[in-house]
Image (cartoon, rainbow, N blue to C red):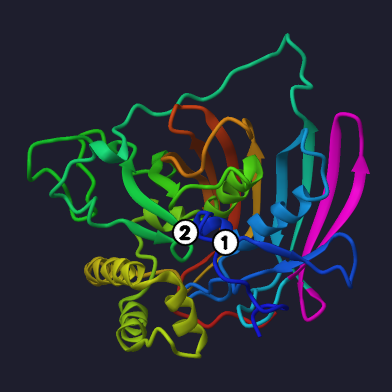
Amino acid sequence: MPTLFEPPPLDESKAPIENVLELTPVVDVGPDVFTNTRPLWHPPGARGIFGGAAIAQSLSAAMRTVPRDFAVHSMHCYFVLAGDSEIPVIYHVERVRDGRSFITRTVQARQRGRPIFTTTLSFSKVNSGGKRKVEHATPKPAIPSPDELPSGTGHKARIEVAGGGPFESRVAGISNRMLLAPPVGLFDNNGWQSSAGDSPRPEDKKVRRFLRARGRISEAGGHEAHLSAVAYASDSFFIGTVNTIHGLPFNSPARLKAMLQVLDGVELDGNDPVSRALGQMGEESISDLQSRLEWELVRATELEKQHKTAPSMVVSLDHSIYFHNPLAFRADEWMLTEMESPWAGEGRGLVFQKIWSRDGTLIATCTQEGVIRLSQDEPRSKI
């Protein structure tokens, strides 16, 4: 059973992301123990549940143990084991320290008594920095908003599913290949505008994307709901940045064909995990996902002809978020993310991410390291 208790009906007064991330206290176990109220999404082809759900629900659990005049400013996470979408997740919050200006919490997400995810979070008292401050922030790149993106290039058609439906996403270009409004015919197969200044160096590229939560986050959810939503979205497309800047597909043609076959034959009232996960997304989102997979299949097939194949393994190891302005944004309005990778090697990759609000406020800076393994001509030695 994917939840410990029978899930209640969806709350139509809340945004989809609020329903996805809802927690239920497990009072029989302890005062600071929670579980997922609804089944968690297992992306088709992924090793386990979407990592953003564990990040966001751990943050939500920790915020329930902190006074409302404190706001999270950092969380440092480790993905320990792949989460099973068929088993409830139990979140254990430990109250490490309660100070006058800072509060520390740790959260362990467990299944079958084993930790699958762990995080340490720090909260600071709101407006405790004083009137005199040292202040600066990286400005938001001057690029068109999602509504200003040119039509007829596939961008508006490719609204991508992020995390099973509660977020919508639109690509916004790669630095040195910026998405502007050029004459028709200057877009390449990726949908980016070509540029004479295009850098051949992966470490020089910055991948940009717009994200926003679907619907309207409720007033009852407060700023905590917006913070959890950003934490959830911060794991979308993150380590995959390494694939993008190296011109590698995310999946092999064979894997994409298998995923499309699953989607073609899925029954929305089926009992298997894939059917149940897709059924929660709704028919429109399934159609979006099919369109994206079909587009990726064309691209992956072309790249394979160029001897560029998908990595054999892409798995997140750790994830950090620094929240800069936790009360100054709405997650249901368009946010811009910019991702870059300063290094990849030894079977791993490191990615940095900045997130800006619609009005240009720098919301958060994130880091993630993950496993990036390519297929080898020779079998790897046993450890």
Instruction: Look at the picture and state if 169 lies above or below 173.
Output: below
Give the residue at mark 2: 166
Contact between marks 1 and 2 (CB within 8 A): the answer is yes
Indicate which disc residue 19 carries: 1
Q: Residue furthest top?
A: 132
Residue at (79%, 22%) from the top-left corner?
128
Instruction: Look at the picture and state if 150 lies above or below 294.
Output: above
Mark 1: secondary structure: helix
Give how far across and how far down residue 363 sits, in percent. 56, 34
Classed neighbour count for the residue bearing mark 2: other residues with Cα under 10 Å, few (<14), some (14–19), many (≥20): many
In the rendered image, the quadrant that contains the C terminus is: bottom right
Residue at (29%, 70%) from the top-left corner?
287
121 on left or right of 372: right
Looking at the image, is mark 1 or mark 2 earlier in the sequence?
1
Instruction: Look at the picture and state if 256 lies above or below 190.
Output: below
Q: Quadrant of residue 306?
A: bottom left
In the rendered picture of this protein, how many numbered marks are placed on residues?
2
Q: Main secondary structure of the magenta part?
A: strand
Does 110 lie within the magenta span? yes
Mark 2: secondary structure: loop
1 or 2: mark nearer the eye: 1
The amino acid type found where label 1 is placed reads Asn
105 on left or right of 41: right
Give how far across and how far down residue 97 sits, in percent. 92, 43
The amino acid type found where label 2 is placed reads Pro
In the rendered image, the quadrant that contains the N terminus is: bottom right
Q: Is residue 166 visible?
A: yes
Give how far across and how far down residue 302 sits, in percent. 21, 68
Q: Is residue 45 visible?
A: no
Numbered range of the magenta stretch: 90-114
Does 109 lie within the magenta span? yes
Given residues 257 and 99, the one toward you in this image is: 99
